[in-house]
Image (cartoon, rainbow, N blue to C red):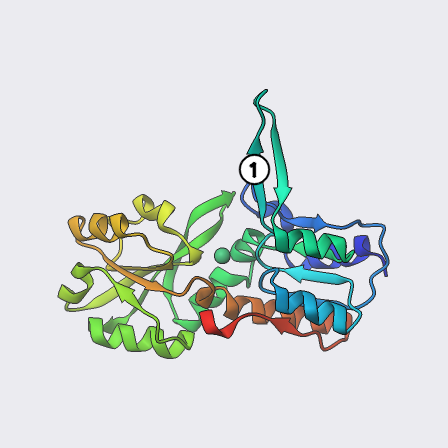
């Protein structure tokens, strides 16, 4: 099978055209003409994934996060994208990479929909739209819980103990309506500020905690990949079914 054929199969499960406009998805390293010799799914390109590829003679990775590049602005204002060291190592080892990223967040049954399922959200609607009604975030209702009860629910459902909240979260008596966005979603906070009791996402910087305090909304931060892993596991299941294989999915559970 050529990389182009694998790309078509991936695209049928996770339509890449619905990713955010500037997102780096599809073949991010390598060539669609290359012959696939072994596939592995990796949450991101890191050294342990590269070692796995080399040890097992695998030349094709399906990654969730895109490879990292550094933007260099030259004297004449032209932009060059330079691969970061780890990206360069994948290139030097002739590994092909197909990246899903926000296409996997927004797609039917993807990362955001999986969170809806996990938290049993009712009356849901999408926010953080990419195209049409496709969006990376979900707003929905849960059976009312205390702030303590909700924190415990998140810990259990997402298999994490790494939780941080804003001050207002501690003052909430009952949580009934939440917003959730896989990965890091604070750039979309204005879309939901007046609408929910709590917003759950990753990588929340201090100024957003204060902003949510002032707007009387709870913020709950989990690890960045914690909200992305459950949906990715479903993708791996679907891909395994389609390929009739048992592919491995590698991520650093330290960050879960
Ligand atoms: Fe992410």
Position of residue 22 measured from the top left corner of the image (x, y, whole percent): 56, 39
For label 1, being within 8 Å of ligand 1 is answered: no
Q: Is residue 256 visible?
A: no
Q: Within 10 Å of the Cα at label 1, are there few (<14), some (14-19), or many (20+) other Cα atoms?
A: few
Of residue 164 and residue 51, the one placed in the foreground of this image is 51
Image height of 192 relative to 174, above or below = above
* Identity of the residue drawn at 37% across and 45% down: 187
Quadrant of the image containing the N terminus: bottom right
Of residue 45 and residue 175, the one placed in the foreground of this image is 45
Quadrant of the image containing the C terminus: bottom left
* Identity of the residue drawn at 17% across and 60% down: 167
Image height of 32 relative to 168, above or below = above
Q: In screen coordinates, is 99 left or right of 213?
A: right
Q: In screen coordinates, is 46 left or right of 2?
A: left
Q: Can residue 158 be seen in this view?
A: yes
* Identity of the residue drawn at 51% across and 68% down: 229
Position of residue 198 measured from the top left corner of the image (x, y, whole percent): 27, 60
Q: Place residue 239 in its image quadrant.
A: bottom right
Of residue 202 and residue 177, the one placed in the foreground of this image is 202
Position of residue 143 measured from the top left corner of the image (x, y, whole percent): 28, 72
Q: Is mark 1 on a helix, strand or loop?
A: strand
Position of residue 39 measured from the top left corner of the image (x, y, whole percent): 75, 67
In this rendering, the count of numbered labels is 1
Q: In screen coordinates, is 212 left or right of 90?
A: left
The residue wearing badge 1 is: 71
* Identity of the residue drawn at 30% across and 44% down: 190
């Amino acid at each position: 099978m050529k990389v182009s054929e694998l790309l078509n199969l991936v695209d049928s499960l996770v339509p890449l055209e619905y990713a955010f406009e500037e997102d780096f998805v599809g073949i991010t390293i390598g060539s669609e003409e290359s012959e696939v010799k072994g596939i592995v799914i990796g949450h991101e390109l890191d050294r342990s994934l590269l070692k796995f590829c080399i040890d097992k003679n695998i030349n094709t990775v399906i990654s969730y996060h895109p490879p990292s590049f550094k933007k260099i602005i030259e004297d004449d204002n032209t932009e060059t994208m330079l691969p970061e060291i780890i990206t360069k190592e994948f290139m030097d080892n002739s590994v092909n990479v197909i990246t899903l990223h926000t296409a996997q967040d927004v797609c039917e049954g993807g990362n955001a929909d999986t969170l809806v399922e996990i938290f049993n959200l009712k009356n849901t609607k999408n926010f953080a739209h990419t195209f049409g009604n496709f969006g990376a975030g979900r707003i929905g209702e849960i059976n009312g819980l205390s702030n303590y009860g909700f924190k415990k629910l998140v810990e259990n459902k997402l298999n994490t103990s790494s939780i941080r909240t804003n001050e207002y979260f501690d003052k909430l008596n009952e949580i009934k309506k939440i917003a959730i966005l896989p990965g890091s979603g604070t750039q979309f906070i204005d879309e939901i500020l007046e609408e929910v009791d709590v917003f759950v996402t990753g990588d929340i910087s201090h100024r957003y905690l204060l902003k949510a305090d002032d707007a009387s909304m709870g913020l709950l931060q989990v690890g960045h990949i914690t909200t992305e892993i459950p949906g990715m596991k479903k993708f791996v299941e679907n891909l395994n079914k389609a390929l009739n294989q048992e592919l491995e999915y590698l991520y650093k559970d330290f960050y879960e």
